[in-house]
Image (cartoon, rainbow, N blue to C red):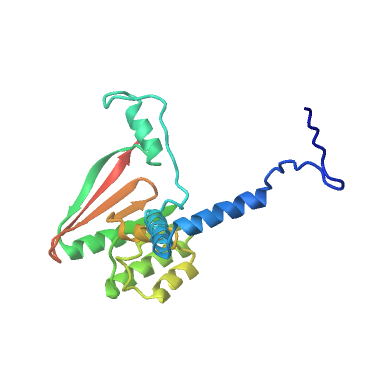
């Protein structure tokens, strides 16, 4: 006996249809919804938020300057100091000390005297400043040199000089003094504000450098000035 099966009229054999992409996405979402409770979703979002916050506070999103050396140098290598100077953007010089002061009045007098002798450029950096007669006299000396054609640059720590009024810096800028703040608050790198500069330097005409050292006691200070040797 031979049986022949023919499709009914108006019907055609069913063929498997490839699943479309939207259907696949919907099925995946439905699976995720069924597998995850609201508690799981909240926990997952919290973990992502904490991870992003940690990266944000660490300054991951802030562009960074990268330095690289293709050769490892020993400390006694003749190219080590030039390489270190290049990485730190510093100038390597030789100098001899010509002045040392340990009394506050002597230090401020020596600083003003060095500023008044400047002919080309004055570069000053400090961590701490407070308003008063000495700060005003210091600003007056810088302004006088700036009006005389000397290029004056001032870099102060944002936190250590918070007691200074904004009008003080405006007065310097109005006289042509370039004033910048070290690590002002930034939304991209909020924890950077905790990193402060403790350098206290005065450089005159790129040949005379004075370094100021302050101790824990108010009068425990000293200053050293040196002159470069060409």
Residue at (45%, 63%) from the top-left corner? 177
Quadrant for the C terminus in the image: top left
Judge by depth and name the residue closer to the eye, 186 or 11: 11
- Which image quadrant is residue 181 in? bottom left
Percent across and percent down for residue 137 are 32, 70
Question: Which residue is drawn at the image coordinates 62% and 49% (left, top)?
Answer: 24
Q: Is residue 23 visible?
A: yes
Q: Is residue 33 left or right of residue 89?
A: right
Residue drawn at x 42%, y 33% is: 68
Residue 181 vs 166, above or below: the answer is: above
Q: Position of residue 203 (x, y in %)?
A: 35, 51
Q: Total of numbered circles in the picture? A: 0
Q: Quadrant of residue 17?
A: top right
Closest to the observer: 172 or 128? 128
| Percent of width and height locating residue 52 | 42, 56
Residue drawn at point x = 75 percent, y = 43 percent:
14
């Amino acid at each position: 006996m031979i049986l022949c099966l023919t499709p009914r009229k108006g019907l055609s054999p069913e063929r498997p249809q490839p699943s479309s992409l939207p259907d696949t996405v919907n099925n995946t979402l439905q699976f995720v919804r069924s597998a995850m409770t609201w508690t799981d979703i909240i926990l997952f979002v919290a973990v992502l938020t904490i991870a992003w916050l940690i990266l944000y506070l660490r300054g991951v999103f802030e562009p960074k300057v990268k330095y690289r050396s293709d050769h490892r140098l020993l400390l006694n290598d003749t190219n080590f100091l030039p390489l270190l100077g290049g990485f730190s953007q510093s100038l390597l010089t030789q100098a001899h000390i010509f002045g040392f002061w340990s009394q506050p009045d002597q230090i401020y007098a020596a600083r003003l005297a060095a500023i008044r002798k400047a002919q080309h450029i004055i570069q000053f950096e400090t961590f701490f400043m407070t308003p008063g007669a000495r700060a005003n006299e210091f600003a007056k000396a810088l302004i006088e040199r700036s009006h005389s054609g000397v290029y004056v640059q001032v870099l102060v720590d944002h936190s250590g000089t918070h007691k200074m009024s904004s009008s003080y810096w405006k007065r310097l800028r109005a006289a042509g003094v370039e004033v910048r703040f070290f690590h002002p608050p930034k939304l991209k790198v909020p924890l950077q504000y905790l990193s402060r500069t403790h350098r206290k330097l005065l450089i005159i005409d790129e040949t005379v450098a004075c370094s100021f050292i302050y101790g824990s006691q108010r009068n425990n200070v000293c200053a050293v000035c040196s002159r470069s040797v060409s």
